[in-house]
Amino acid sequence: MPAPEIALTERFQSAFAEAFGPEYRDADPIIRPSQFADFQCNAAMGLAKRLGAKPRDIAQRIVEAVDLEDVAEPLEVAGPGFLNIRLRRDWIAAQVAGIAEPSAQLGLTDPEHADTVVIDYSAPNVAKEMHVGHLRTTVIGDALARSLEKLGHTVVRQNHIGDWGTPFGMLIEHLLDVGEDSDEAKLLESDPNAFYQHARAKFDGDEAFADRARRRVVTLQAGDEQTLVIWTRLVELSKQYFHRIYDMLDVTLTDDDLAGESTYNDQLPIVTKQLEADGLARISDGALCVFPEGFLGRDEKPLPLIIRKSDGGYGYGTTDLAAIRHRIEDLGADRIAYVIGTAQELHMTMVFETAREAGWLTDAVEATHVKVGSVLGEDGKILRTRSGESLRLMALLTEAVEKARTVIDELRPDLPEGERAQIARDVGIGGVKYADLSTAHDSDYVFDLDRMLALTGNTAPYLQYAVARIRSISRRAQEQGVVADAAPLVDNDAERALALQLLQFAPTLEQVGAAYEPHRLCAYLFALAQDFTSFYDASPILKESDSQVRAGRLALAQLAERVLVEGLDALGVRAPQRM
Ligand code: ARG
C-alpha cells in the first residue's frame, strides 16, 4: 500500500510527461511534508529553469495536467510556485484501512530486490569486560538487523569477537595455573577484567611466567592440539559472559553468529599471497604492508596497512581483509555494514580501499562503516567509574533496572510484584537502549539514567506508556463489549493527523534500513505517540455514544498500538502490557 508521497509522485510524474513531454517523466516532484498543507510539491522551480519559463506559470500548467481528483483537494499555488497539497479525507481513510488489514504488514511491502546484508556488530573481546562502547555497537547493530529483516532483506549477523592474538599466551598460562574449575576461572563469566588483570600482573612481575606465556603464543599459533583445547575453554567461558549480557539486553545474537578473528586464521596466508602476487604488498621496515591509494601520513608519506609483522604475526587489518573477502565471496553480501567506533574510521577506509584494489570489493557490493560515537559521563568525558576504570556494562544495566523499579513502584503500586519486576526490566533496559538509538549513531551522548527513564520526552518509557494506555483502553472496551468492528475513523483534525502519521511507518523504516539510521525511527515513534495523545484528548473513545464512531476510533487507536509495538520491536525495545 503506497504512502502518500509515492502515490503523489506517480501522479505528478504523469502530469510532467503530459504537460512538458515524455522526457520530463523522471523529474523529481520534490514532495515534502509542509506546515501550510499536508504536503508541498516544489517541482515548478526546477522545471521552470529547464523549460525557460516562469515558475508560477509552470505551476499552473502542472495544476491543469495533474489528475489528483481522488487523492487530494484542488491544488493551491503559493508563493513563487509552490503547490500546496491537502489530501482528501476519504483517501487517507482508505489508505489507513488498507495498512490495517492483517495481511498488509502495516504498509511494508517486499523490496524490489531482497539484499543479503552482512552486519558486523558487538565484537567484544575474549577475557575482557564489555564496556559501554560495546553497548552502542551491540544495540545499534541489533536494531539494524531487526529492521532490515522486517523490510524483507536477508541479514547475516557477524560477531567478530577478539579471540586471537598475543594476550592469549598469558591468559592460557594463567588458566592452566589456576585450573578450569577454580573460582578464579569462574571470573571469566562474571568479571573477566579481573581475570585479565591477574594474568597481566603475573606477566609483568614473574619472568618465568612471562617466558611460558610467550612460548604458549607460539604453540597456539602452531596449532598445538593441547593448547587449542585450553584456548577453546577460555573462549567458551567468555561466550557465557557475552550471552548473559545479550540476554539481559534482548539482543538477537547467538552462537551461530560468532565469527571471531580466529576463524580467519587459515585464510591469512592465502590473502597475504594474493596481495603479494597482485603487487599490492611489499616489505617496509621489516613488515609486509599494503599502501592503499589516497592515504598519506604526516610528512606526506604513504600510510601502511600492516599485513604481516616482522615477527611473522598477522595484523588486525589482515583479519579484516580475510573477513571482507569471506563476506562477499562465501556469504554473498550485497551490502556489508560495519557497526564500529568512530575511532576505527581510518582502519575501515584503508581496509575497504585495499579490498577494492585486490578486486574483492566491487561496485556491486556496498560496504559502509556505520560509525559509532562515544558514551560520555556527565563531565563530558568517556564514561568511567569514580576510580577511573571503564564502567562495567552489567553493573550499569542492573542499576538501570533498579532505578526503573522505583519509577514503576511509584506509578503502579497496585500491580503484583512479579509483574512490576518484569515492567522494570522492560523499562530499564528499553530506556538505556532507546537513549542510545535515539541519538544519531555518529554523535556522542551523555549517559544520564534519569533522563533515559523519564516518562516524558523522546524516551522509551514515554512510548511504552503510550502503548500501555492503548492496551488499557482495549481491555476496558472488551469488558464493556465494545469491539473495533469498523475501519479506522478519519474524521476530525486529530484523527486525520494521526492517520497520516501512521502511513509514514513503512517509508520511515525503509529509510532506516537504507541509511542505517535507527534514530529516524525513534523520532518517528515519538511524533506518533504525541499524535496519539492529541487524538485521544480530542476524540474520546469509550465515552463516545455513537457506536460507529466509537468502533472507528478504537480501530484507529489499535492501529497506532500495532505500529508503536512493531516500531519498538524493530529497535529491540519491549512494550509491557500495563504501566
Ligand atoms: N574487537 C574490536 C574492539 O573491541 C572490534 C572489532 C570490530 N570489527 C571488525 N571487523 N574490525 O575494539
Image (cartoon, rainbow, N blue to C red):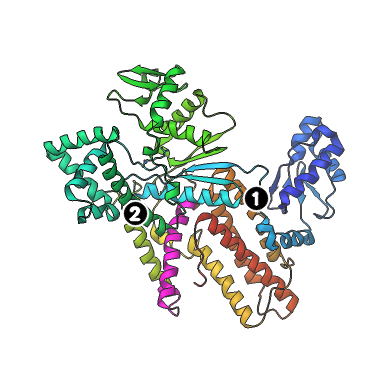
Where are the magenta residues, as a range? 409-437
Return the residue nearer the eye: 244 or 451.
Answer: 244
Q: Quick one: which residue is furthest to the front in this view?
A: 225
Mark 1 / mark 2, whichever is N-terminal? 2
For label 1, the SS is helix
Q: Is mark 1 within 8 Å of ligand 1?
A: no
Tell me if 472 is positioned left or right of 224 in this view.
right
Residue at 63% x, 64% y is 560
Residue at 39% x, 56% y is 448
The residue type indicated by label 1 comes to Pro
x, y percent for residue 215: 20, 33
Tell me if 64 is positioned left or right of 150 in this view.
right
Give the quadrant of ligand 1: top left
Q: Residues within 10 Å of mark 2 (few under 14, many from 20)?
A: some
Return the residue nearer the eye: 8 or 64.
Answer: 8
Tell me if residue 134 can be seen.
Answer: yes
x, y percent for residue 6: 73, 48
Name the residue tied to disc 2: 240
Residue 411 belongs to the span the image colors magenta = yes
Secondary structure character of the magenta stretch overall: helix
Name the residue tied to disc 1: 507
